[in-house]
Image: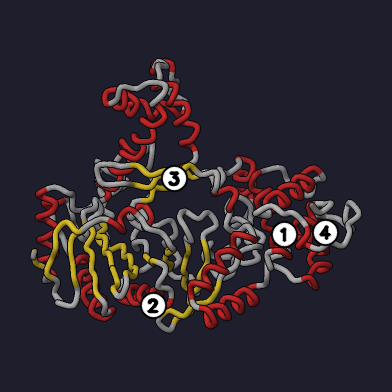
Amino acid sequence: MANHPLEGLLAFSLRNHLIERQDLPFCRNLLLDALGLDAPQEPYAPYEAEQIELPPTATPFLAALTEDAVQRGVCADTQGQRDAFFARLMGCVTPRPSEVCRQFNHRRNLEGAKNATDWFYKLCRDVNYIRVDDIARNIQYKAPTMVGDLDITINLSKPEKDPRDIAAARLQKSAGYPPCMLCVENPGYAGRGAAFPARQNHRFVDLDLCGEPWHFQYSPYLYYNEHCIVFNEKHRPMRIDRSTFEKLFDFIGQFPHYFIGSNADLPIVGGSILSHDHFQGGNYIFPMTTAPIDVPLHSPDAAVCAGILNWPMSTLRLRGAEPEKLLDVAERVLAAWRQWSDPACDILAYTDAPHNTITPILRREGEDYVFDLVLRNNRTSAEHPMGIFHPHADLHHIKMENIGLIEVMGLFILPGRLKAELTALEGLLSGKSEASIDPDTPLYKHLPWVGALRSKYDITPENAHEVLRQGVADKCARVLMDAGVYKQTDAGRKGFLRFLASVGFART
């Protein structure tokens, strides 16, 4: 091991081709400046990186350097400031954006799109933009439910905000720069407290989608394998129309080993960033991906196979080898759904605002494109003020956030608070009295659920952990059932078929 974590970080960067040997003095000086040092604290010796035993990630070196900076007063002792200092240190050894784009395009032209994304994915992990060690802490499991197998993640990689960071952020004036966390101004940005994380080690590559400049990056918290984000160069709102569909097909034409999809373009049913047009993709098989066709359909175009998916989110699956044919059918479905009301199923296209939209998801299977169109509606009511087709109130103790693209497909990202709460509930299920739970504690909101679990299962100390895991998965299944506009009932299926008949579909 190098004699100091600074030298270890340089060795790691050299080994993983983030820097070249000629860069060593330059990068060492950048790190010294970030650390508030005039010279290395310990004697350093020339080394051959090939002969040094190194960890799989840079985290041990970053942690040691950051702890030293905290002790010397160079970095404030809050989680937010530590994270920002990690990014600042790693930014000193992260290749320039132009070099990243050059390397990506060189590999893509020489060896194909998959080689290029493999290289870029590894780079983003090596520079700690993808928080590999933090992500490893997440609790992940699969569970069977009434709607099929679901993927559950309790997300521990995205840290809770430190109250001191939040307080400091309130005192800061809004800079308006970058306009949002998906804008092109982000790489190299030092951040602005809890409201906007540091991005010195962030990189993206350039894409052309349908003649427009777009960009491709990976998600720092990686909710699934090779979780990527494709975003427009302009800071413009999300929108779903034919041109959106065309860009999805263009992307899959360039990167056929990935899927790509878009959050809906309305509040409640949209994603967390509606202000910036973007897609999400990656290399992962979601539960919805493998869901079978429940009702086969004749399509308005014989070149397009169609069917209603056996999935709680109301999904029309289109399949075919000709993009233009699929685009024409999908455009007809979207145009019709924007205007469709079905009061018998509580669906109104308009009240004080438009309510209907679609979540589109595209992938390749051999020569075919598989295009899933998920119907969404964001109407609210007095009974369901957060959304009629949104997780209802009895689910909020587990999940109350928007149901975006990832959850639509059956992967649930649940808040990190659940780890401690579920651990405490294990004791409760094993015999601790409900009366001992203070109404002011986080556990109190779970008490109706605890009662339901006790009624359903014979719970012992040995099985309490698994009972809770299954209980969480069952709640997630209910989330999907609540969010589906046409329920998987006889009345719901008839309603779905009424809508599809209006577009020219018929049962086979």
Q: Pointer 3: what residue?
A: 153
Marks 2 and 4 in Cβ contact (< 8 Å): no
- Foreground mark, 4 or 1, reads 1
Mark pair 3, 1: CA separation: 30 Å
Question: Looking at the image, can residue 42 be seen?
Answer: yes
Residue 68 numbered tag: none
Give the mark nearest the N terminus, 4 or 1: 1
Q: Which residue is mark 4?
A: 32
Q: Residues within 10 Å of mark 3 (few under 14, many from 20)?
A: some
Q: Residue furthest right?
A: 43
Which element type, helix, strand or loop, lies under badge 4? helix
Residue 199 image-quadrant placement = bottom right
Looking at the image, which residue is at 47% across and 60% down? 227
Image height of 438 relative to 213, above or below: above
Q: Amino acid at mark 3?
A: Thr
Along the viewing direction, whichever of 472 and 257 lies nearer the viewer: 257
Residue 169 position within the rendered picture, expressed as x and y whole percent measured from the top left: 61, 49
Amino acid type shown at disc 2: Gly
Q: Could one spot residue 268 in this view of the protein?
A: no
Q: CA distance from mark 3 to mark 2?
A: 31 Å
Mark 4, Cα crowd under 10 Å, few <14 / some 14-19 / many 20+, is: some
User: Is residue 270 placed above or below 245 in the rendered structure?
Assistant: above
Give the x, y percent position of residue 76: 73, 46
Most extreme residue toward the front, as rendered?
A: 51
Residue 12: give its label. Answer: 1
Front tag of 3 and 1:
1
Q: Label 4 is placed on what type of residue?
A: Leu
Badge 2 marks a residue whose secondary structure is helix
Q: Read off the residue under disc 2.
A: 253
